[in-house]
């Protein structure tokens, strides 16, 4: 599986989406509903109503990349359904893609340095 670096920005759309949408439809949803830039390099994660499928949308600098995954057994662990988006770390996204409970993963956030040493 191709995984992005851990420093990448990952945003999860918390509401399920129509899984008939392709890359262009999801990019329009990112702009219109989530008020984000689909061409920023951010990984956008979308869920299905059944919770057993997900789609990732990311701009790689040359085009939109759409990845679709279905679990053969079980469901993905999703945040509660609310409006807007939720941010995940790269490690949490790896756990989500593996079908694990990403919410149990503690990822310490590093603060920005105040000055160079």
Image (cartoon, rainbow, N blue to C red):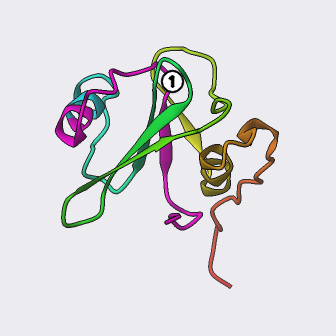
For disc 1, the neighbor class at 10 Å (few under 14, some 14 to 19, many from 20) is some
Residue found at the very far bottom of the displayed protein: 117
Is-magenta flag for residue 75? Answer: no
Q: x%, y% of residue 109?
A: 71, 54
Q: x%, y% of residue 80?
A: 63, 18
Residue on which the image places disc 1: 14
Please name the residue shown 19% across and 66% down the image. Answer: 62
Q: Is residue 111 above or below residue 75?
A: below
Residue found at the very far top of the displayed protein: 82
Q: x%, y% of residue 8?
A: 50, 59
Question: Which quadrant: the C terminus?
Answer: bottom right
Please name the residue shown 30% across and 29% down the image. Answer: 35
Q: Is residue 116 above or below residue 85?
A: below
Per the picture, the main secondary structure of the magenta-coloured stretch is loop
Q: x%, y% of residue 86?
A: 55, 32
Viewer-proximal residue among 115 and 69: 69
Q: Secondary structure at mark 1?
A: loop
Instruction: Give the magenta-colored segment's residue range.
Output: 1-27
Please name the residue shown 27% across and 27% down the image. Answer: 20
Residue 25 as seen in the image, left or right of residue 7: left
Is-magenta flag for residue 4? Answer: yes
Q: Quadrant of residue 34?
A: top left
């Amino acid at each position: 599986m191709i995984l992005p670096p851990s420093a990448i920005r990952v945003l999860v759309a918390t509401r399920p989406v129509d899984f008939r949408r392709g890359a262009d439809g999801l990019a329009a949803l990112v702009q219109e509903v989530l008020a984000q830039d689909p061409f920023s390099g951010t990984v956008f994660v979308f869920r299905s109503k059944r919770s057993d499928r997900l789609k990732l949308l990311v701009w790689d600098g040359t085009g939109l990349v759409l990845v679709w995954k279905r679990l053969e057994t079980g469901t993905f662990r999703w945040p509660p359904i609310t409006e807007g988006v939720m941010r995940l770390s790269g490690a949490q996204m790896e756990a989500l893609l593996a079908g694990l409970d990403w919410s149990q993963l503690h990822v310490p956030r590093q603060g920005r340095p105040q000055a160079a040493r």
